[in-house]
Image (tube, grey):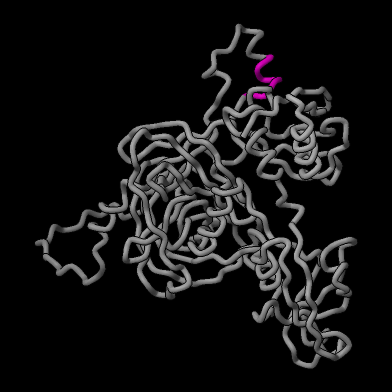
Amino acid sequence: MPTLFNRRRPAVIAGVLALALGTTALTAIPGTAQQATPVAGVALARPAGPDFADMAARVGPSVVRVITSERASPQEEMMMRRFGRPAPEQRERRAGQGSGFVIHADGFIVTNAHVVGDNAEVRVELADGREMAAQVVGRDVATDIALLKVEAGAPLPALAFGDSDRTRVGEWVMAMGNPFGLGGTVTAGIVSARGRQIGAGPYDDFIQTDASINPGNSGGPLFNAAGEVVGVNTAIFSPSGGNIGIGFAVPSKMVQSVVAQLRDHGAVQRGWLGVTMQPLDRDLAAALRVGDAKGVLINAIEPDSPAAKAGLRAGDVITGIDGRRVESPRDLATGVAEVTPGRTATLAVLRDGATIEQRVEIGTNPANVTAGKPAQLRLGLGLAPRPQGGVAVTRVEPGSVAAERGLREGDVVLRADGREASQPRDVSEAVNAARSAGRPSIALQVERDGARRFVAIPLTAG
C-alpha cells in the first residue's frame, strides 16, 4: 500500500509528512568480507530505564486496527458487469488501514479522519482478533480526528484520557498501533516538544515525540507513564516515509473536545469571526502606531460576518480575546473557534494608536456547518455548503433513510421541497416545515456526476 506524503508541506521545513499507510523494506547494513575472530561474550548490565511491559499488557486490549474499503465507481461497476454481474465483495476494495483505540465500553473508538477518509465501509479488528463493521459517527478534518462506533455485543476495555497540558518535554511516552499493517506494536520515547505547528491546519498544536511512529500508526494512542492517553498519533516528518524520530500527536485536550461534539452532533461547530489576518511585525507595528505591541493584523473583513456587524475594520490589531493574549494568527483562530456560536466574545483591539474593547457575537463557521440535528436524525445526512452552489453531502449514516434512498457522499443537494438549497440550514428548515405541515415525505433535487434527479425522502418520526 502506498505511503501518503505531503499532507501539507510546512513552509520552513524541507521534508514531508507521511500519513496513514505505507510499505517498507529491510535494508542490510554493508559490512566487510573479513571474518571476525570469535571472542568470549561479556554480560553487560542492563541500563536503568522505564519498563513499559505491565502498562502495555494493561492498555493493549483497547488498541484496534482500522480497515477501510472504498466502493467501486459506477464506471468500474459497468466494466465489471461486461464480464458478469459483480459479487458484493467485488464492489468493495481495500483502501487502507490505520489504528484506533476504544474510549468507551459501549464501542466508541477514536482514530484519525485521514484514516477513515470518505470510504464507503470501515471495519475494526479488535485486539482479540474479532473483526466487525464500524459506523463513522463523525469526522473533523480540521483536527484530523474521527469517531467510530461498533456493536461488539459486550462491553469493550476502554482507555482513559490524560491531561496533555501537563505533559513536559523530556518525559517518557509510549505509542501503540498498527505500523505497516503488522498488527499491535509498542514503541517508546520521550516528548520532544509541545505546541508544534507543521502546516496541517489552523489549529495545529501537536505534541512532538521520538517514540517510533510509522505509516499505519495513524490514529493510535500516545500514552504517558500512567497509561493515560495524552495524544493521538497523526503524522511523521520523514524524507523516506519511515520513522526518523520525529512524530506528531494531536493533544488529548483537543481530542476530548472534538470527540464530545462528534458524539453529540456528528460534527464540530466552531466559532467564526469572518476576518483574514496576518502576523504583526516590527515595521507594520511602527507604521500603525502600536509601538512594540504584539498581536494580529486584520487585513480584510468578510461581508455580513460577525466581524463586519461588530464594526471591526481592516487595519485593526487584535491583541486579546476574552482576557487571553493573542500574539499570532493561530492564537486568534483557536480562541475564536473555542467560543460557542451565538455567544459574545470580547476582543482587545488597537486602532489608530488607541486601545479599545470590542464585543462580537461569534457566528458559526460556514466550513463546519452541518444540517441541524433534528434533520440529521431523520435523514441521516451530513451537509456542508459549496462555494459553487448547492449543499454537498459529506456523510450518509449507514442504515438511515438517506442511505436506503441511495444518497451518497459527494452528492449535491440543489433544492429541498421546492426551495433552493445553498446552506445546510435550507435543507433543515425545509424538512422541519414539511413535518410541521404533517407531510409524510420531502423531495430533494440531487446532482451526481453532472446528472440531476429528484429523490423522495420519507420523514420518519424521531
Q: Residue at x 59, y 31 (%)?
A: 120
Tell me which secondary structure the magenta stretch mostly adopts.
Answer: helix
- Residue 368 in percent (x, y) is at 70, 51
* Location of residue 301 by image quarter: bottom right
Q: Residue furthest bottom?
A: 291
Which x, y percent locates residue 19?
A: 55, 50
Q: How many marks?
A: 0
88 w.r.t. 370: above or below:
above
Residue drawn 15% across and 69% down? 45
Q: Looking at the image, is 289 positioned above or below residue 422?
A: below
- Which quarter of the rendered picture does the C terminus lie within? top right
Q: Is 288 colored magenta in this rendering? A: no
Left or right: 24, with 49 as reference point: right
Q: Residue furthest left?
A: 40
- The magenta-colored residue range is 72-78
Q: At which x and y percent is residue 272?
A: 75, 62
The foreground one among 258 and 33 is 258
Q: Nearer the viewer, residue 438 or 57?
A: 438
- The front one of 5 and 132 is 132
Q: Quadrant of residue 321?
A: bottom right
Q: Which residue is more in the foreground, 307 or 54? A: 307
Q: Residue at x 55, y 33 (%)?
A: 95
Q: Position of residue 358 (x, y in %)?
A: 80, 78
Q: Is residue 51 left or right of residue 398?
A: left
Identify the residue at image location x=86%, y=43%: 388
Q: Is residue 399 left or right of residue 180?
A: right
